[in-house]
């Protein structure tokens, strides 16, 4: 399951980040690392962007970034 598959209000634990290169670096620079809990706050009507809460901070991710973050409930 990816972060994109979670509905608003659901929380999951990051297992891995599938992308390599600049996109993975950008995701990890935001604090999204394996083992961290992520809660989906809001998803735009067309699915882009996805707003998440991580470590008390609210971030916006693009749909393409969320598709590369593997989570478990």
Image (tube, rainbow, N blue to C red):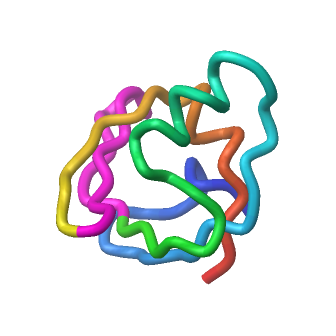
The part of the chain drawn in magenta is: 40-55
Name the residue rendered at 20%, 51% in the picture. Answer: 58
| Quarter containing the N terminus | bottom right
| Residue 51 quadrant | top left
Q: In the drawing, does residue 12 fall left or right of residue 47?
A: right
Q: In the drawing, does residue 45 fall left or right of residue 66?
A: left
| Quarter containing the C terminus | bottom right
Q: In the drawing, does residue 40 fall left or right of residue 5?
A: left
Name the residue rendered at 52%, 27% in the picture. Answer: 26
Q: In the drawing, does residue 21 fall left or right of residue 63?
A: right
Q: Position of residue 71 (x, y in %)?
A: 66, 66
| Residue 57 quadrant | bottom left
Name the residue rendered at 32%, 54% in the picture. Answer: 52
Q: How many marks?
A: 0
15 in the magenta segment = no
| 53 lies above or below 45 | below
Judging depth in this view, the residue of 2 and 58 nearest the camera is 58
| Residue 23 quadrant | top right
44 in the magenta segment = yes
Q: Position of residue 49 (x, y in %)?
A: 35, 30
Question: In the current view of this chain or complex, which residue is farthest to the bottom?
Answer: 73
| 12 lies above or below 3 | below
Q: Position of residue 3 (x, y in %)?
A: 57, 54
Q: Position of residue 69 (x, y in %)?
A: 66, 49
């Amino acid at each position: 399951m990816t972060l994109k598959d979670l509905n608003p209000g659901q929380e999951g634990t990051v297992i891995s980040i599938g992308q390599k290169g600049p996109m993975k670096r950008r995701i990890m620079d935001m604090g999204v690392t394996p083992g961290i809990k992520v809660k989906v706050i809001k998803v735009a009507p067309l699915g882009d962007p996805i707003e998440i809460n991580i470590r008390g901070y609210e971030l916006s991710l693009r749909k393409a970034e969320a598709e590369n973050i593997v989570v478990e409930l």
